[in-house]
Amino acid sequence: MSDTRETWVALSALQHLLFCERQAALIHVEQLWREDVNTALGRLLHERVDLPGHDARPGRRVARAVRLGCSRLRLTGRADLVEYHPDPASPTGWRPYPVEVKRGRRKSHDADAVQLCAQALCLEEMHGVAVPEGALFYGAQHRRQAVSFDVRLRARTEEAIARMHELLERRDVPVVPKAPKCESCSLEPLCLPHVTAGQRRVAEHLRRMVESVDL
């Protein structure tokens, strides 16, 4: 009998996916995890932030560790911070503004922005109001970077969600070539990219040899 349960994508999986599809699958399909210094520091930072609660600040309300969900995209997770800014145009009088806290510095890729945009998509469904912007806070630089949720970023985010659903539903763990970024990955000793990539090259070579045989 087939399993008819729907898969839901964790918000955190999107950053893993855009860093490396194999890393995302090892964590979210195979349920593997290995902590190193960088992941431990990140976890400690989020433990300080992820204490559920609310407080009021001048001109805004702030909610911490907010549970999020989007049934349309089958997406679930938690936002570090959601600020609610006064907005007379909003049906509730408030407009959500997600803020994601990161330990390091701004990255060259868009994984952080995609994760934040996914939070905005959840908030839009939950509150029935457009969420046009949010912010990333980088601890190493101790400042915010505003992120506009434009058409391009929204499309990129939905593509990443769809790809993560595909990996989960197929229970696929892609094989990827070893790259410089592997050295910064805590899962490198479990992933063994230099071994698995080599196995894939051998398998492809054997397949081409078999296909070339004239029977």
Image: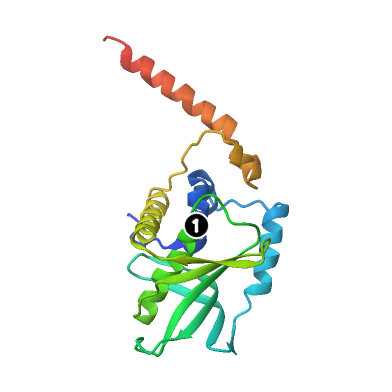
In-front residue for pair 80/98: 98
Q: Please say if 139 is above or below 189.
A: below
| Mark 1 residue element | helix
| Residue 73 left/right relative to 43 | left
In-front residue for pair 169/186: 186
In-front residue for pair 198/154: 154
Name the spot of residue 127 as percent of width and height, x first.
38, 81
Q: Which residue: 41% across, 87% down?
A: 87
| Residue 21 left/right relative to 105 | left
User: Can residue 205 be seen in the rendering of this structure?
Assistant: yes
Name the spot of residue 74 as percent of width and height, x first.
37, 65
Q: Quadrant of the C terminus?
A: top left
Coloring applied to the structure = rainbow
Q: Which residue: 37% across, 63% down?
A: 150
User: Can residue 29 be seen in the rendering of this structure?
Assistant: no
Location of residue 130 by image quarter: bottom left
- Which residue is farthest top? 214
The residue where tag 1 is placed is 13
Name the spot of residue 37 as percent of width and height, x first.
73, 53
Name the spot of residue 119 as percent of width and height, x first.
45, 69
- Which residue is farthest right? 37
Q: Which residue: 53% across, 26% down?
A: 198
Q: Please say if 31 is above or below 135.
A: above
Q: Which residue: 42% across, 19% down?
A: 206
Location of residue 56 by image quarter: bottom right
**Label 1 is placed on what type of residue?**
Ala
Location of residue 5 by image quarter: bottom left
